[in-house]
């Protein structure tokens, strides 16, 4: 039995009885290399999980035990954290106290009261008459200023949002203290402190704007797309969110002061929150988007920062219940489909929060508050009914007379056994109906008079494996060859079909110097096991387990009126287990030879038709640990901030995919080059595989690791009563991704022993793999020059007009697109691919013969292992981090106490952005003049073709993943079939300019 540990991966469970699926603690960060996990047998299934397509649901076990330990450990460990960079989400209130003559008043007593909790913060003005309250939670406050010989000043209606920098200049009048001056108007919404552009979605907005229930749980982050500078592209897809021209998934997202980074996954920022962590509007106090010229404490973004803060309890008890319903009867009918699609969605839950008035938790000095939100989302069906293309009954029997084009004419299906060169073909002419390089005879049935009919006495038809799939196909809903089957019940898309969301927060105020908080966000989703086609042919792969956890703890401590500290620690993780629904029918499906196993049915996919099969199972976690600290020092007219942050990132994953193979069928196998012809289903019946792949694993469990750290310093200088100057410097370092035990490989420029020592080989990380070793754990060089200066000016032209300008450089993190964190297991594992030749006319192999065995199975720790295939390329300079230069010029004017307009010129220039523009293995354009000769194929034994020599001895036989064409021989690295695009290539550049206008009426005071 595995033992649970927080920082070290538990031992794998070794005794896995058949029919079970082990659940080691993948969400921790470590794991032993010598004990590989072998996933065997069937995952647990509910009785009705796949009993009928269109219905059913998979059972899920409980694996939250360690999460509870993690949360408790975090709450207990906060007292041990020393001041260490914080993504500070707290607001601040500052100002200057003056007498009627305009002279500053030092040593004035200033107090700020939270209307939610009653907590009072007290300071005195310095020798310049300045005061500042940093590290404030968003909410409503009341300010009181008193000084000997002057009337007290009381400012009500102070409403703070995330990261607000509110300035309240206080004019005291001579008089008695009990003759107070009360100001009830809202504090000025103008920012006269810095050049930061920020858009806040206040609690009132979250409460009042509608959020529809549309296949997903409601999310407070959905409002981000309403902000100036935020776009979602032509498709209005929230997953494509970009801020001020930045990269997709290139922004940063923060919950309660901690980054929501998803391990070493590519998804970050708003796209990650939309796709993985919906935050209930009932649980979120406020959402804010910082879009330009942020302070040095912020980084890891190519554009902006999305911040969210969970709701906290107050002095009064508050609760709510809610239900949102979407029903089938409210849906419209689709064109051509008589019945409405089944679509029943329920989003319901409740909240409660308030004080904990218990002995020990509520004392004269200490006050404890709590807030709990629970939301459930359930969906059956979907908003639209899919219409699929499946082989017609005729086609399943070899009759393709219904295979017609848009003009109603039959599309010919040809017999590949009759393939012959066209004696009249002109190689200098473009291939087309009048210039065909090859000829074939059309199928004409047993009687020789039935076009497009394969005779059922044809031995190829009689021995076909296709019937073993066809027998599970449903009857078409409509006539015709395409778009002929209406799915009975829509299958909900996404991972949130059935979800439970919990948000829990506690706050503890100890005196007026310490504030502690702990919050925990969790999402647990259960995907119903519904399928579009019968379960034997299902492509669906629901999550048996899928959950996300985000615990956070923080501590704000006031050392003195001029020295404060904020420290926070957080953990993000998403854990998932997923199996194919068709897995239990593997015994009923064809078992193709030459593959690694037959634990799943093979995948079959076609041109023009919907495919069958899934052939995948995995489980994994994406843990992230973050600790940050921000210290604030007030000295005269300066406010200094300094701190740092450390992130430990990982992916822990067990993969078992494509073990039974994937097989593709195309038109060309039964068609002709240069003319509309052929049918992919006919190619399946004849067993003509156009392309195929199979996975062969010796390592199934792997652990990607990376870390990043930053240091920063900033100074906010109130140079004059009208001018504020902000400057600072941030330093970012990201260490390239590694595999914990160096079981990863990648392209290297060294000599390839299996390719005549040509440049370009497969290198293995570290130095324990003999001659194949790379000598370092990662190909990229760690880059230490990520220095990012920031400068901003804010000038009050009048009490109602402010001009602001700023410039800054921001580095984003290292990116590894995909779901593997930069880790490739070539040599330990192998994904072998096969493809057709002669432009698609010659199949890769016959299905009945199985995968060709003309390759070396892993493990094979050799630099020539991927010859004739593709491999991973990570550019050596890719760890030189992408960065953006941001600048803006903003003019704000307040027309009334409740209305102001802001006009901003905003620019963002991206450099070294994530790209896909510089393949290593591209054909030199000078060879394009060879035309069709580039597609000519070398035959075994040939040393030259069309004047081009064979690259090296044995090259033709190595080319199993692509055809040995003249074009392939002319590539810089002809031993590889891939273009060798850098996985983490960052050679892109971008430029963004905009004019952003905003008219705003601040929310009324609480």
Image (spheres, rainbow, N blue to C red):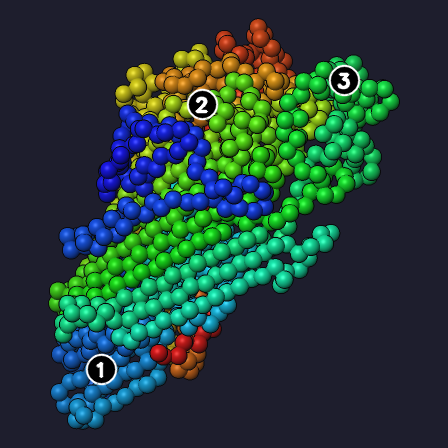
Q: Is residue 237 left or right of residue 20?
A: right
CA gap, disc 2 to disc 3?
A: 37 Å
Q: Residues within 10 Å of mark 2 (few under 14, many from 20)?
A: many
Residue 948 image offset from top left, x and y in percent: 58, 13
Q: Locate the C terminus and report the quarter of the image it occupies.
A: bottom left
Whichever of labels 2 and 3 marks the residue nearer the N terminus, that label is 3
Relative to 95, residue 541 above or below: above
Callout in the foreground (1, 3): 3
Q: Residue at x 27, y 79 (%)?
A: 142
Q: Is residue 446 left or right of residue 51?
A: right
Q: Residue at x 37, y 67 (%)?
A: 351
Residue under label 2: 696
Residue 283 image offset from top left, x and y in percent: 37, 64
CA gap, disc 1 to disc 3?
A: 97 Å
Outermost residue, front side: 47
Residue under label 1: 144
Whichever of labels 1 and 2 marks the residue nearer the N terminus, that label is 1
| Secondary structure found at label 3 | loop
What label does residue 461 carry, if any?
none
Outermost residue, top side: 941
């Amino acid at each position: 039995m595995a033992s649970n540990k927080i920082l070290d991966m538990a031992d794998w469970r070794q005794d896995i009885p058949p029919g079970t699926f082990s659940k080691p603690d993948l969400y921790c960060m470590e794991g032993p290399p010598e004990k590989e996990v072998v996933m065997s047998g069937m995952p647990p299934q509910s009785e009705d999980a796949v009993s009928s397509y269109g219905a059913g649901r998979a059972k899920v076990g409980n694996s939250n035990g360690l999460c509870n330990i993690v949360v408790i450990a975090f709450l207990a460990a906060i007292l041990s954290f020393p001041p260490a960079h914080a993504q500070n989400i707290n607001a601040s209130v500052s100002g200057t106290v003056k007498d009627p003559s305009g002279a500053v008043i030092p040593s004035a007593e200033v107090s700020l009261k939270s209307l939610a909790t009653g907590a009072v913060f007290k300071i005195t003005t310095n020798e310049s008459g300045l005061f500042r309250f940093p590290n404030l939670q968003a909410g409503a406050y009341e300010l009181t200023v008193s000084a000997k010989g002057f009337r007290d000043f009381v400012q009500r209606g102070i409403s703070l949002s995330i990261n607000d920098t509110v300035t309240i200049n206080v004019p005291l009048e001579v008089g008695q203290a009990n003759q107070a001056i009360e100001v009830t108007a809202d504090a000025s919404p103008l920012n006269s402190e810095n050049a930061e552009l920020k858009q806040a979605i206040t609690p009132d907005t979250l409460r009042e704007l509608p959020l529809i229930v549309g296949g997903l749980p409601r999310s407070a982050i959905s409002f981000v797309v309403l902000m100036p500078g935020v776009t979602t592209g032509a498709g209005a897809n929230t997953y494509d969110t970009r801020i001020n021209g930045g990269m997709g998934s290139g922004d940063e997202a923060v919950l309660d002061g901690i980054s929501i980074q998803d391990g070493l996954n590519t998804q970050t920022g708003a796209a990650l929150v939309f796709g993985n962590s919906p935050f209930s509007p009932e649980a979120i106090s406020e959402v804010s988007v910082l879009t330009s010229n942020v302070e040095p404490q912020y980084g890891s973004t190519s554009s902006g920062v999305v911040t969210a803060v969970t709701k906290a309890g107050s002095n009064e008890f508050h609760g709510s219940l809610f239900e949102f319903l979407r029903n089938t009867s409210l849906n419209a009918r689709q064109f051509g489909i008589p019945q409405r699609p089944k679509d029943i969605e329920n989003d319901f839950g409740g909240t409660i929060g308030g004080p904990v008035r218990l002995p020990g938790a509520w004392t004269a000095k200490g006050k404890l508050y709590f807030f709990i939100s629970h939301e459930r989302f359930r969906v059956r069906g979907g908003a639209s009914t899919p219409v699929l293309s499946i082989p017609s009954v005729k086609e399943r029997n070899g009759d393709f007379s219904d295979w017609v084009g848009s003009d109603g004419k039959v599309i010919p299906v040809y017999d590949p056994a009759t393939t012959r060169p066209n004696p009249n073909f002109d190689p200098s002419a473009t291939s087309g109906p009048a210039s065909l390089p090859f000829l074939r005879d059309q199928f004409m049935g047993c009687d020789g008079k039935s076009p497009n009919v394969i005779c059922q006495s044809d031995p190829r038809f009689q021995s076909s494996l296709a019937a073993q799939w066809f027998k599970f196909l449903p009857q078409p809903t409509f006539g015709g060859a395409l778009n002929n089957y209406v799915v009975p019940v829509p299958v909900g898309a996404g991972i949130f079909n059935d979800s439970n969301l919990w948000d829990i927060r506690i706050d503890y105020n100890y005196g007026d110097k310490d504030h502690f908080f702990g919050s925990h966000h969790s999402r647990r989703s259960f995907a119903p096991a519904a399928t579009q086609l019968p379960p034997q042919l299902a492509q669906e792969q629901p999550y048996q387990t899928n959950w996300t956890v985000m615990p956070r703890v923080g501590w704000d401590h006031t050392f003195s009126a001029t020295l404060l500290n904020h420290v926070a620690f957080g953990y993000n993780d998403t854990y998932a287990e997923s199996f194919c629904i068709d897995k239990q029918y593997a015994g009923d499906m064809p078992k193709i030879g030459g593959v690694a196993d037959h634990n799943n049915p093979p995948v079959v996919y076609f041109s023009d038709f919907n495919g069958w099969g899934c052939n995948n199972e995995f489980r994994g976690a994406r843990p992230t640990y973050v600790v940050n600290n921000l210290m604030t020092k007030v000295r005269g007219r300066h406010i200094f901030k300094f701190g740092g942050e450390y992130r430990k990132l990982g992916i822990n994953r067990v993969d078992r995919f494509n073990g039974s193979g994937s097989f593709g069928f195309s038109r060309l196998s039964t068609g002709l080059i240069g003319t509309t012809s052929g049918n992919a289903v006919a190619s399946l019946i004849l067993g003509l595989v156009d392309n195929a792949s199979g996975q062969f694993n010796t390592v199934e469990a792997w652990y990607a690791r990376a870390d990043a750290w930053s240091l920063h310093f900033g100074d906010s200088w109130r140079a004059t009563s009208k001018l504020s100057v902000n400057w600072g410097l941030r330093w970012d370092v990201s260490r390239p991704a590694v595999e914990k035990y160096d079981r990863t490989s990648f392209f290297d420029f060294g000599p390839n022993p299996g390719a005549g020592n040509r440049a370009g080989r497969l290198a293995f990380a570290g130095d324990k793999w003999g001659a194949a070793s790379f000598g370092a754990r990662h190909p990229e060089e760690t880059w230490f020059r990520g220095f990012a200066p920031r400068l901003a000016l804010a000038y009050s032209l009048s009490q109602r007009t402010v001009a602001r300008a700023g410039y800054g450089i921001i580095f984003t993190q290292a990116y590894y697109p995909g779901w593997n964190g930069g880790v490739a297991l070539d040599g330990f594992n192998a994904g072998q691919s096969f493809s057709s030749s002669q432009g698609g006319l010659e199949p890769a192999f016959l299905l009945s013969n199985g995968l060709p065995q003309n390759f070396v199975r892993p493990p094979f720790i050799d630099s020539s292992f991927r010859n004739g295939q593709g491999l991973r390329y990570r550019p050596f300079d890719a760890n030189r981090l992408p960065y953006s230069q941001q600048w803006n010029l903003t003019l704000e004017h307040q027309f009334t106490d409740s209305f102001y307009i802001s006009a901003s010129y905003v620019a963002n220039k991206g450099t070294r952005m994530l790209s896909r523009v510089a393949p290593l293995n591209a054909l030199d354009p000078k060879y394009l003049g060879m035309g069709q000769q580039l597609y000519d194929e070398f035959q075994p034994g040939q040393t030259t073709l069309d004047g081009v020599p064979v690259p090296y001895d044995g090259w033709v036989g190595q080319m199993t993943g692509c055809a040995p064409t003249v074009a392939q021989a002319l590539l810089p690295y002809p031993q590889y079939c891939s273009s060798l695009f850098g996985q983490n290539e960052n050679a892109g550049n971008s430029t963004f300019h905009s004019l952003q206008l905003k008219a705003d009426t601040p929310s009324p005071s609480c």
